[in-house]
Amino acid sequence: MGHYKSSLTDALKSIEINPQFIKGYFRAAQSLMNINILDKSLEYLEKCEENSENEKLNLKGCKALKELIIYKQKEHEYNKTSKF
């Protein structure tokens, strides 16, 4: 988990330096997803999508990660309600 926290710190610093740096938002979202902070991860992906209107490749990556996070959220909710 330490690796993801370090990656998150780096991503947030990159956003602070350059708020238009799309990869910073994407990497922050990835790191948050990997430490199961899914709602915050989606917030960073929304910012990624907002800032990547002219960069279709980056937009595709943001959308793909968003789908994965939404899937993980649904899986997490299912596991909370299932009684195995």
Image: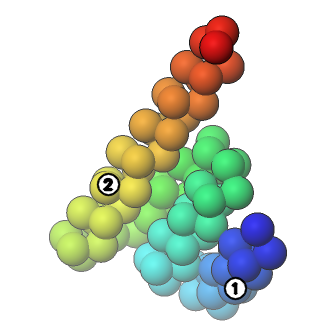
Q: Position of residue 13 (x, y in %)?
A: 71, 85
- Tag 1's secondary structure? helix
User: Which residue appears at 63% of the width and 87% of the height?
Assistant: 14
How far is disc 1 from disc 2 in space, using C-alphas?
A: 22 Å
Residue 63's disc number: 2
Q: Amino acid at mark 2?
A: Lys
Label 2 neighbourhood size at 10 Å, few (<14), some (14-19), many (20+)? some
Q: Quadrant of the N terminus?
A: bottom right
User: Which residue appears at 63% of the width and 42% of the height?
Assistant: 39
Name the colouring of the figure. rainbow
> On the image, numbered disc 1 is attached to which residue?
10
Choose between 52 and 72: the one closer to the eye. 72
Q: Residue furthest right?
A: 2
Is residue 84 depicted above or below 10 in this figure? above
Q: Position of residue 65 (x, y in %)?
A: 40, 56
Q: Residue furthest front?
A: 84
User: Which residue appears at 36% of the width and 45% of the height?
Assistant: 67
Choose between 38 and 18: the one closer to the eye. 38
